Image (tube, coloured by chain):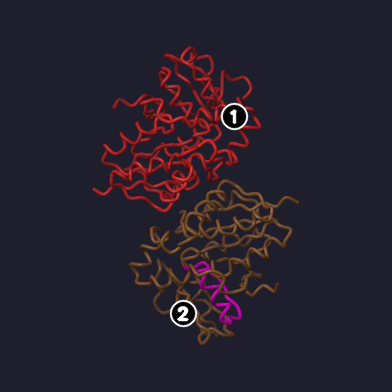
Chain colours: A brown, B red
Amino acid sequence: MLKKVEVCFTPSLLPLYEIENAIVVVIDIFRATSSICYGFENGAKAIIPVATVNQCLAYQNQNYLLAAERDGQVVDGFDFGNSPFSYTRQKIEGKTIVLTTTNGTYAINQSKAKAYQIIIGSFFNLDAVCNYLYKQDKNVLLLCAGWKNKFNLEDTLFAGAVVYQLKQNGYTSDDAGTAAQDLYNLAKTDLYAYTSKTSHSERLKKLGIEEDIKFCLKLNITQVIPVLTGNTLVKLNV
Amino acid sequence: MLKKVEVCFTPSLLPLYEIENAIVVVIDIFRATSSICYGFENGAKAIIPVATVNQCLAYQNQNYLLAAERDGQVVDGFDFGNSPFSYTRQKIEGKTIVLTTTNGTYAINQSKAKAYQIIIGSFFNLDAVCNYLYKQDKNVLLLCAGWKNKFNLEDTLFAGAVVYQLKQNGYTSDDAGTAAQDLYNLAKTDLYAYTSKTSHSERLKKLGIEEDIKFCLKLNITQVIPVLTGNTLVKLNV
């Protein structure tokens, strides 16, 4: 079968795509899906993505770590937020984390009911994700979390990196995939320089978390692929 | 005031933008907004964009020309559709056309209730549109009609061409504007070659209207700027 890879630039557009028979890769480079990948690399047992801060609070006092981020900052009273540097082995090994973020966990929850399978992508596991995808007999939807349902550049760049690899393995793409691939091609020699002109990067710089940005652009530091099973992300056995 | 230019990639995302105080430029390069510009250049008196084929039919027998396109083809029983080559002086000079198309007139109607002003952009009137915009004390939203609410490349390229000019005049942009500008920069030396990889271009080629595509990529063949007044597009007096 001729497989296709499509790019959905924001969760708002998700209803336009047929995903019943597709693997959805959720992408929120700054920073939810980067942190999730890093968390599993550092031994997290499971991560439960929830849509709201209140849903996160419902897990209090049950031996979970609670992580909540809104508008780039840790929500008051939570163990930590959305920075990959919080997901250290010392803190999270063997633990289950309940996580809510502005965009990333929202995107996961939007696709949950319909997709054949949902996995988590970031530059940290780029090659692992691509290697997994083209061994499956499924179409692929790259779902960018964006920023509050608007398009963003950093998620698009990662989508473009995946499109590039899958096209080399015979996938066809849509216009959004072509655009993403061309933008990635422009940016790939210096992702940090390119993303420094993004709105989100500006936002994070103001919050003093520029180091997070640099870190989230590192390629292939893990082979882990987080996969959604029921309501919980776990390590995919490949 | 520091003015901003934002790009909305599809009408689906329009509710995310504040346009009460913005000029909205509606873009449907293949082919509605190109044909509208070309129609005014050839002496059309007015064009009434309507959302549905039935709304178009309601104008029958009233001395209007009726134009209807769906999925790239003229709807049976209509005078003509969406090809700029139908909008000849001989046919349309002094006439009022009622027009419905798959994407373009839908986008116009979606923004109608809220925008400060709605104008029509295409490569045909690129410089005229930019020159008009930066003389106004308003923010700008470039609204790509897309294809059935999905992203498309050709509308994005035009948006990028406008972003490029407005940024040179001091406007700030969003991530979508940055992406559009970078894609336009990649494509501008040969727009036809670049758009030949778009899905819509494939669709039109199959319909045998490749000449339409080439024509719609011509730059600055008119100074006309169509503007929506009530429910009707007329020539803007600048």
- Quadrant including the C terminus of chain A: bottom right
Q: Name the residue at 74% across, 58% down.
A: A137
- Where disc 1 sits, the SS reads helix
Chain for mark 1? B
Residue B57's spot in the image, x, y percent?
55, 22
Closest to the observer, B195 or A33: B195
Residue B66's spot in the image, x, y percent?
53, 20
Residue holding disc 1: B210
Q: For the residue carrying disc 1, how many other residues have a C-alpha within 10 Å: few (<14), some (14-19), or many (20+)?
A: some
Farthest bottom residue in view: A90
Report the Cα–Cα distance between label 2 and label 1. Answer: 55 Å
Disc nearest the viewer among 2 and 1: 1
- Where disc 2 sits, the SS reads helix
Residue A22 vertical placement versus A44 (above, below) = above
Q: Inspect the image, locate mark 2, and give the three-letter code of the amino acid beneath it.
A: Ser
Residue B82 vertical placement versus A132 (above, below) = above
Q: Inspect the image, locate mark 1, and give the three-letter code of the amino acid beneath it.
A: Glu
Residue B232 vertical placement versus B65 (above, below) = below
Farthest left residue in view: B1
Q: For the residue carrying disc 2, how many other residues have a C-alpha within 10 Å: few (<14), some (14-19), or many (20+)?
A: some
Q: Name the residue at 63% across, 32% down.
A: B205
Residue A118's spot in the image, x, y percent?
63, 64
Q: Residue B2 vs residue B42: left or right?
A: left
Residue holding disc 2: A86
Residue span colored magenta: A31-52
